């Protein structure tokens, strides 16, 4: 039920309005002066205020200004027995939803009230949706490494310095970039993200700088690039180490001259962009191998923030796990589950190859498959859904009760880390393809990569559909 406040120094008007609105099932308060009306607005949550303009003690326009300074989204309908066009315009300029004359026409009054309430609801829903869409998760943890990152963000974010964020996949590099933007002077402008690893090398320049119609075979119309979209804001180049050398040269020029040229175009376009970059690669090694430009590295690496692997900050796992637990249970509309002390120790002892992203997936899995309290046995049972030896599985001497770390797969068959990554990537893509009945487009959307990139992976790993 909507809650309304009437502020008017005429008892007859207040009584009439109250009777009409209560008959329409609105909850109504009324007061005879603006000073006490403002106090009520600050103490209670109203959905709409109907306010007289000419009153003793405080003018209605002053009430409107002060109330909107306190609660900017509160709809106001101004009422006056001496209504003029000039008064209505002034009320609108000060933020009133509408203006009606005394004595109010019943039908117009009810329609205006309904419209004002609908607008208020839409404003609230829009803000909630924006918060959900753009919500930036807190950087969780209080380890020395994480505290240092938070301090660096506080110092660096308000400046225009470029930042290179390094760390393993899933460690939270994107989150650091988001907070650098949130705390910057550009926070009201867009943060545009580009995953350089997910875009084929032949398309990366078009993605970053845009292209003109007809500049290449499939360029059927003009395209605005990410640099232009980020103008006035922040551009986050994720996995910058996977960018082609030709694109690197253009990015370097854009950083030096603050100008870009679309593919197939001749006109130079000025851009005002703060660039943040991230990589999971050793760029110095990439430079030695001729895969990355030294001059671009120095342009990007004004400030370096290294995000540690989850196994390097195991003391943060309980805080991160509990935050994920609450958020996921809330999303699923279920009571928040608990993790036993032994269960939390088991989580801390896991070999987190997938970092924080893997921890999130693990917590979601435990919520779905466990009872009200997640135990160390649950962690042992569900740590490795793909098979193999589980954490805490029964071995001579532990009887399946200790949360000791055991191998989740046969690591001996891998010669190096890249072999293991290729194996894991192949199995993951194979699983997703089979899950989607080998629909490549659907699988590409599911795992958030370009379809052409997925075809390349299928060819690389020699994946074939098995038919009966």
Image (cartoon, rainbow, N blue to C red):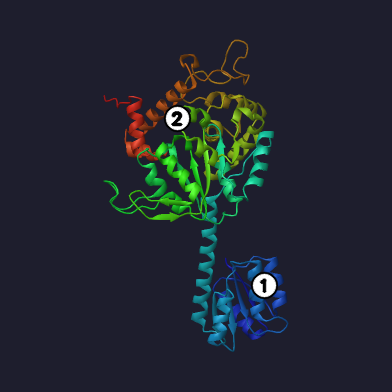
Q: Residue at x 36, y 30 (%)?
A: 457
Q: Residue furthest top?
A: 396
Mark 1 and mark 2 residues within 8 Å of each other at the beta carbon: no
As displayed, is residue 224 above or below residue 18? above
Q: Which quadrant is home to the C terminus?
A: top left
Q: Nearer the viewer, mark 1 or mark 2?
A: 2
Instruction: Find residue 108 and report its horizontal and vertical position in percent.
Output: 49, 80
Determine the secondary structure under disc 2.
loop
Q: Residues within 10 Å of mark 2 (few under 14, many from 20)?
A: few
Q: Residues within 10 Å of mark 1 (few under 14, many from 20)?
A: few
Instruction: Answer whether residue 192 is visible to the viewer in this image.
Output: no
Give the residue drawn at x 57%, y 18%.
Answer: 406
Report the disc number at residue 290.
Answer: 2
Residue 206 in the image: above or below residue 2: above
* Label located before the other in sequence (1 or 2): 1
> Percent from the top left, x then y, of residue 353?
53, 27
* Quarter occupied by residue 196: top left
Which element carries disc 1, helix, strand or loop?
helix
Instruction: State left or right for residue 310 relative to residue 460.
Output: right
Label 1, label 2: how many angstroms apart (C-alpha)? 63 Å
The image position of residue 274, as x and y in percent, is 53, 49
Residue 310 x %, y %: 60, 30
Q: How many marks?
A: 2
Residue 65, image quadrant: bottom right
- On the picture, is 46 further left or further right than 458? right
The residue at which mark 1 appears reads as 66
Is 349 displayed left or right of 129 in the figure?
Answer: right
Quadrant housing the N terminus = bottom right
User: Does residue 405 show up?
Assistant: yes
Give the residue at x 57% y 75%.
Answer: 96
Query: Is residue 179 placed above or below 32 in the rendered structure?
Result: above
């Amino acid at each position: 039920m909507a809650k309304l406040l009437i502020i008017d120094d005429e008892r007859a008007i207040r009584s009439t309005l109250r009777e009409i609105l209560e008959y329409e099932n609105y909850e109504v308060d009324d007061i005879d002066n603006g000073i006490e009306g403002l106090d009520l607005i600050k103490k209670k949550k109203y959905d709409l205020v109907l306010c007289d303009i000419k009153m003793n003690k405080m003018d209605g326009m002053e009430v409107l200004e002060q109330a909107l300074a306190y609660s900017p989204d509160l709809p106001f309908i101004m009422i006056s027995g001496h209504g003029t066009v000039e008064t209505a315009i002034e009320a609108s300029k000060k933020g009133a939803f509408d203006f009606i004359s005394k004595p109010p026409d019943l039908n117009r009054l009810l329609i205006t009230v309904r419209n004002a309430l609908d607008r208020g609801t839409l404003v609230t829903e829009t803000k909630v949706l924006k918060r959900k869409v753009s919500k930036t998760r807190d950087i969780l943890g209080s380890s020395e490494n994480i505290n240092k990152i938070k301090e660096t963000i506080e110092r660096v974010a308000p400046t225009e310095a470029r930042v290179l964020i390094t760390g393993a996949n899933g460690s939270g590099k994107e989150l650091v970039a988001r907070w650098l933007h949130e705390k910057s002077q550009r926070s009201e402008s867009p943060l545009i993200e580009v995953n350089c690893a997910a875009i084929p090398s032949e398309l990366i320049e078009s993605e970053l700088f845009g292209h003109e119609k007809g500049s290449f075979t499939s360029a059927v119309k003009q395209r605005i690039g990410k640099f232009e979209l980020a103008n006035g804001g922040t551009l986050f180049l994720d996995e910058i180490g996977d960018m082609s050398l030709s694109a690197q040269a253009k990015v370097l020029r854009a950083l030096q001259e603050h100008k870009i040229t679309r593919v197939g175009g001749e006109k130079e376009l000025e851009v005002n962009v703060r660039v943040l970059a991230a990589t999971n690669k050793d760029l110095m090694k990439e430079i030695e191998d001729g895969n990355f430009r030294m001059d671009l590295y120095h342009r990007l690496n004004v400030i370096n923030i290294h995000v540690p692997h989850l196994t390097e900050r195991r003391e943060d796992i309980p805080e991160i796990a509990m935050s994920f637990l609450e958020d996921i249970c809330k999303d699923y509309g279920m009571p928040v589950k608990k993790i036993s002390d032994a269960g939390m120790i088991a989580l801390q002892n896991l070999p987190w190859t997938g970092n924080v992203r893997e921890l999130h997936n693990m917590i979601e899995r435990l919520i779905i498959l466990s009872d009200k309290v997640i135990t160390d046995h649950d962690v042992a049972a569900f740590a490795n859904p793909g098979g193999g030896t589980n954490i805490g599985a029964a071995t001579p001497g532990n009887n399946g009760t200790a949360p000791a770390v055991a191998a989740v797969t046969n690591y001996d068959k891998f010669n190096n880390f890249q072999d293991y990554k290729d194996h894991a990537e192949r199995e993951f893509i194979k699983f997703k393809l089979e899950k989607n009945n080998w629909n490549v487009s659907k699988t590409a959307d599911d795992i958030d990569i370009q379809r052409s990139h997925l075809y390349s992976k299928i060819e690389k790993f020699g994946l074939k559909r098995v038919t009966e």
